[in-house]
Image: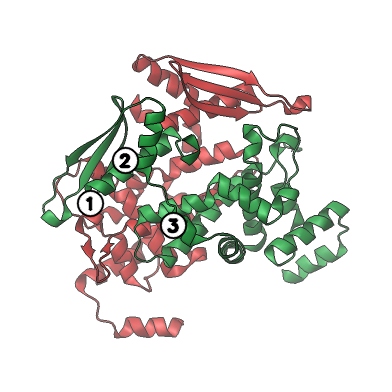
Chain colours: A green, B red
Amino acid sequence: MHFTRFFTRWIKNYSAKDKKLIEAVKRITGVKPYNVELYSLAMKHTSIAKENTHGFKESNERLEYLGDAVLGAVVAEYLFKRFPYKDEGFLTEIRSRIVNRESLNRLAIKIGLSQLVEYEGRKRNSQTFKSIYGDAMEAFVGAVYLDKGFKYCRKFIVKQLLIQHYDLEEIIETTTNFKSLIIEWAQKNNKDINFETAQKSATKKSNKQFKVKLLLDTELIAEGNGYSKKKAEQDAARKSCEALGIDKNSI
Amino acid sequence: MHFTRFFTRWIKNYSAKDKKLIEAVKRITGVKPYNVELYSLAMKHTSIAKENTHGFKESNERLEYLGDAVLGAVVAEYLFKRFPYKDEGFLTEIRSRIVNRESLNRLAIKIGLSQLVEYEGRKRNSQTFKSIYGDAMEAFVGAVYLDKGFKYCRKFIVKQLLIQHYDLEEIIETTTNFKSLIIEWAQKNNKDINFETAQKSATKKSNKQFKVKLLLDTELIAEGNGYSKKKAEQDAARKSCEALGIDKNSI
């Protein structure tokens, strides 16, 4: 297998563009790609996609879908092992701060991926182009996964991306207080937020669970659960922020 | 490594409960577990969680978080390879139909996992207990992943779960038409749905992209994009259904 790959690479005449990409992949991941076409596709924004012989427009969107999932799983495991005594709410929140569009945009610029992305269109500040680098970052991860397999891809994500480019301490310190966030957002938008608490039954006192409903004016947005009222409120607020698309930039 | 594992297993005195669990894991995955405690934790609902020496309540919630991510990645890759000419919207939708709470609940019951879940509380029809089996299903996948590694876990998910228990053809046929869904929902709730289309600029005619806003009464719920008006409308409708928590059961 390896011999075949070597041989294929040896006899292939790469274009100048491919050669540049091969060097970039080597710089970013540490090794040359087996299949440069995967990376080439990962850098192809849908704005320049052309139909292939199957009538299908080939862009990096499929690789982005795959890379998003692989990145999510690897970061999930990393945090799971790194924080053995933190609950899943904490882990979910930290992960979403690592892999959100904004972080991935920044990451793509930091590692030089942004310079490789091919796209067309001048409106670089429009909505579509806001996520172009982050999308390409995910597609790149998808390409590494298909090219080199899970173990290698995991090592790449953890060593070259997470450890080198993220300050976990800082991320943890600035973790969002969703209750404050949604209250602030509501005030700004002249809306009322109400938390309705209902203590849930449990056979043992120690396991009393709380259920909290978040109402926006009179409309139920989400329900939260937790073993304290505070936790249930945070849970309801987090789910509501997700449902309403509220983040720090909304304020 | 294998010898150590064998030796550890050999000298360990398992409880009757653990022995039952070991047999169940073997029946479900095809092989005995290395570390039965992982599976035992995966079956422990938060309602019976006890604090460990670190003051941390040990339940299956952390494993559920991990298993959810691993399952997502494996199903993503499976669909990616199975449908090479389908776009990421299709892949995302099919995946969400495979791993949604309802499907995972059903799956947990089918493979007999539901009989192993430990929980406390009589309100089995309440909101919390609606997802108890599906949550345990994800936690079980998390346990398999930690116990056996990625390759084995992927094989387990694809061969024992996906291929045996899902009818992909049927899933594809019944894929939701989000535009119809949200219109039906709005009619039932006496609300108005409006799609506002604005054609986006593009330098090449072939790449004209459409942007569609979905308004509920006068409120903007979501924006969709696509290379046809129809695609952009579906995108806006799908995002709006997500934001408003609308699914087929809402109708």
Q: For the residue carrying disc 3, how many other residues have a C-alpha within 10 Å: few (<14), some (14-19), or many (20+)?
A: few
Residue at 32%, 71% in the rendered image: B36
Q: Which mark is residue A172?
A: 3
Same chain assignment for discs 1 and 2: yes
Q: Amino acid at mark 1?
A: Tyr
Neighbour class for label 2 at 10 Å: few (<14), some, many (≥20)? many
- Dot 1: few (<14), some (14–19), or many (≥20) neighbours within 10 Å? some
Marked residue chain, label 3:
A
Q: Looking at the picture, tell me which residue is in the foreground, B98 or B219.
A: B219
Per the model, the C-alpha gap separating discs 1 and 2 is: 13 Å
Q: Which mark is residue A236?
A: 2
Is residue B98 rendered to the left or right of residue A195? Answer: right
> Horizontal and vertical percent for residue B101?
36, 43
Query: Element type at marker 2?
Result: helix
Indicate which disc, 1 or 2, sits on the residue closer to the N terminus.
1
Q: Residue at x 68, y 57 (%)?
A: A111
Closer-to-camera residue (B208/B83): B208
Q: Nearer the viewer, mark 3 or mark 1?
A: 3
Q: Please state if A211 lies on the left or on the right of A43 as rendered.
A: left
> On the picture, is B235 further left or further right than A229?
right
Q: Secondary structure at mark 1?
A: loop
Coordinates of residue A213 in the picture (x, y in percent): 26, 36
Residue A202: percent from the left, percent from the top?
Answer: 14, 49
Parent chain of label 1: A
Q: Which mark is residue A227?
A: 1
Front residue (pair B1, A91) = A91
The answer for which chain carries disc 2 is: A
Does B73 appear above or below B38?
Answer: above
Does the rendering let one see residue B67? no
Disc 3 vs disc 2: Cβ atoms closer than 8 Å?
no
| Nearest to N terminus: mark 3 or mark 2 | 3
Task: Give, as a three-letter code, the residue at label 2.
Answer: Ala
